[in-house]
């Protein structure tokens, strides 16, 4: 084996070791504090906390950075205060690697209204469809959250906070949508997404 191939193999092994160390650090952080609200596998036991399993890793890292900087306000400000950028990325990768779950549909008729709004919006009130940004499968992007399988109560709270501008980051577009949604539409969309 020539020297350049040996060097390349060593670099790959070192990179894999760094990634493993980052994920090990993420596991330690999750076990130390994240699990209290979000569970060890990103499946929070309380509907007021978001499910993180299967969430987009870049989105998690960005939200942690926003909490740390104060751009987003909430309980997480204190939790994110001592995280490094590398730890935020590692936490994003850790939770993204966990399989997401869904809820069962408890009110199929209301969920059907939510499905309609998710894919079609409401042309009479000017509400844009959710799928145009969050995707046909509600999987989001690196900049937008996965909504599929999220706790219904958490989704309702976030939409209400976007409406009142209590959600202090990522508010420009979402305020214009949430401010036009009725309470029934918010409940319907949240119910549909939680079972998706």
Image: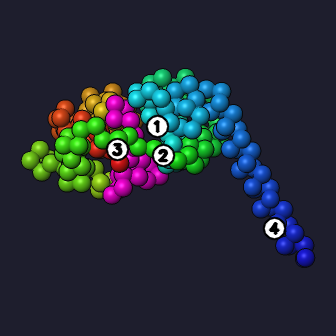
Measured Cα–Cα span from mark 3 to mark 2:
11 Å
* Front disc: 3 or 4: 3
Residue nearest the observer in this picture, 102 or 67: 102
Residue at 38 percent of width and 40 percent of height: 103
* Front disc: 4 or 2: 2
Q: Which residue is mark 3?
A: 195
Label 3 vs 4, first from the N-terminus: 4
> Is any atom of residue 136 visible in this view?
yes
Q: Is residue 107 magenta?
A: no
Measured Cα–Cα span from mark 2 to mark 1:
8 Å
Label 2 vs 1, first from the N-terminus: 1
Q: Are marks 2 and 1 in contact (CB under 8 Å)?
A: yes
Q: Which residue is mark 4?
A: 8
* Front disc: 2 or 1: 2
Label 3 vs 2, first from the N-terminus: 2
- Name the spot of residue 191 as percent of width and height, x first: 29, 39
Instruction: Indicate whether 107 appears above or below 16.
Output: above
The magenta segment: 134-154
Measured Cα–Cα span from mark 1 to mark 3:
13 Å
Measured Cα–Cα span from mark 4 to mark 2:
36 Å
Secondary element at tag 4: helix
Q: Which residue is mark 1?
A: 51
Is 116 placed left or right of 67 in the picture?
A: left
Instruction: Indicate whether 12 appears above or below 86.
Output: below
Is 103 placed left or right of 119 in the picture?
A: right
């Amino acid at each position: 084996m020539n020297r350049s191939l040996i060097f390349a193999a060593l670099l790959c092994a070192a990179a894999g070791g760094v990634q493993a160390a980052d994920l090990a650090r993420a596991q330690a952080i999750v076990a130390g504090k994240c699990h209290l609200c979000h569970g060890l596998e990103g499946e929070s036991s309380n509907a007021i906390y978001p499910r993180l399993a299967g969430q987009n890793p870049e989105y998690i890292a960005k939200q942690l950075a926003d909490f740390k900087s104060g751009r987003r306000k909430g309980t997480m400000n204190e939790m994110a205060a001592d995280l490094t950028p590398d730890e935020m990325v590692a936490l994003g990768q850790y939770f993204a690697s966990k399989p997401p779950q869904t809820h069962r549909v408890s009110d199929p008729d209301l969920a059907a209204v939510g499905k309609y709004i998710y894919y079609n919006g409401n042309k009479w009130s000017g509400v844009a469809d959710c799928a145009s940004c969050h995707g046909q499968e509600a999987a989001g992007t690196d900049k937008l959250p996965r909504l599929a399988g999220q706790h219904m109560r958490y989704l309702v709270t976030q939409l209400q906070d976007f409406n009142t501008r209590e959600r202090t980051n990522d508010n420009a577009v979402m305020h214009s949508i949430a401010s036009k949604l009725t309470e029934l539409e918010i409940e319907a969309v949240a119910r549909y997404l939680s079972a998706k």
